[in-house]
Image (cartoon, rainbow, N blue to C red):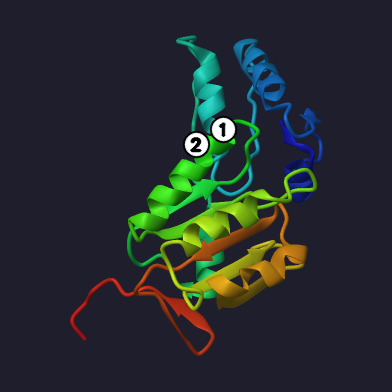
């Protein structure tokens, strides 16, 4: 069971298996189907991208169970921000905040508040779901908020399709992120460094604070 795109990514593993998949925004329907199937005695695999416990389906499954006795195993995966960080260098070596710019489940005012707080506190900032065909302005607004607290030369990274076909990773700056807007979509991750982050040999590095 899973979102159509993610089911496609594991297609080689699905021979002989019954598949239930549907589109974006239909997560609750998918998870209810999985729970009912499990309650009937069947073994169900719920497929998420990255890690199912980070913006994935593990939380929704556990919420919907509401005390019903179903054995659930949450299998750890590789979150998109971890894969993206590895491609960019080592930008997450110190404290960071991960913020989704999708307002489907969180009101935009709350998202702006979180971006402001993270920027003010000098966290390295990871931006998930930065842009979609229906959400073209959110990333621009988030960058404007961050620029209130960081200069335009702050290192930033753009990654699309991390560890997948068509992978792309670009080290740039906060001031130049807007130039990548045409590339940015829901398959993209953006990482903005903190006041200590620097670049060397095309890599982003955020010092942990070791005495070297």
Q: Quadrant of residue 41?
A: top right
Image quarter where the C terminus lies is bottom left
Image x and y of residue 141, in percent: 60, 53
Q: Number of marks in the image? A: 2
**Marks 2, 1: nearer the viewer:** 2
Mark 2 element type: helix
Q: Quadrant of residue 3?
A: top right
Mark sitting on residue 110 = 2
Q: Which residue does the image show at 80% across and 48% down from the upper left?
A: 133
Outermost residue on the left side: it is: 211
Residue 151 or residue 169, whichever sits in front: 151
Q: Which residue is mark 1?
A: 106
Image x and y of residue 66, in percent: 48, 11
Contact (CB < 8 A) between labels 2 and 1? Answer: yes
Q: Quadrant of residue 29?
A: top right
Mark 1 element type: loop
Instruction: Say left or right for 12 vs 78.
Output: right
Image x and y of residue 167, in percent: 70, 68
Q: Which residue does the image show at 28% across and 71% down from the upper left?
A: 208
Q: Which residue does the image show at 73% across and 55% down from the upper left?
A: 185
Q: Residues within 10 Å of mark 1 (few under 14, many from 20)?
A: few
Q: Which residue does the image show at 50% across and 81% down from the upper left?
A: 203
Instruction: Say left or right for 89 vs 8.
Output: left
Mark sitting on residue 9 = none
């Amino acid at each position: 069971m899973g979102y159509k795109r993610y089911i496609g990514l594991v297609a080689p593993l699905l021979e002989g298996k019954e598949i239930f998949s549907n589109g974006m925004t239909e997560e609750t329907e998918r998870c209810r189907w999985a729970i009912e199937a499990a309650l009937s005695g069947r073994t169900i695999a719920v497929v998420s991208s990255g890690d199912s416990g980070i913006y994935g389906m593990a939380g929704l499954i556990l919420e919907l169970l509401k005390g019903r006795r179903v054995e659930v195993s949450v299998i750890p995966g590789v979150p998109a921000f971890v894969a993206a960080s590895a491609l960019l260098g080592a930008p997450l070596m110190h404290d960071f905040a991960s913020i989704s710019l999708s307002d489907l489940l969180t009101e935009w005012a709350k998202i702006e508040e979180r971006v402001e707080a993270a920027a003010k506190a000098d966290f390295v900032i990871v931006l998930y779901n930065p842009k979609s065909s229906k959400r073209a302005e959110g990333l621009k607004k988030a960058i404007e908020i961050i620029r209130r607290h960081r200069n335009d030369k702050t290192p930033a990274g753009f990654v699309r399709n991390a560890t997948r076909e068509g992978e792309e990773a670009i080290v740039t700056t906060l001031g130049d992120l807007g130039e990548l807007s045409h590339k940015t979509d829901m398959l993209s991750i953006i990482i903005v460094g903190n006041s200590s982050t620097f670049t060397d040999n095309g890599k982003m590095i955020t010092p942990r604070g070791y005495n070297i």
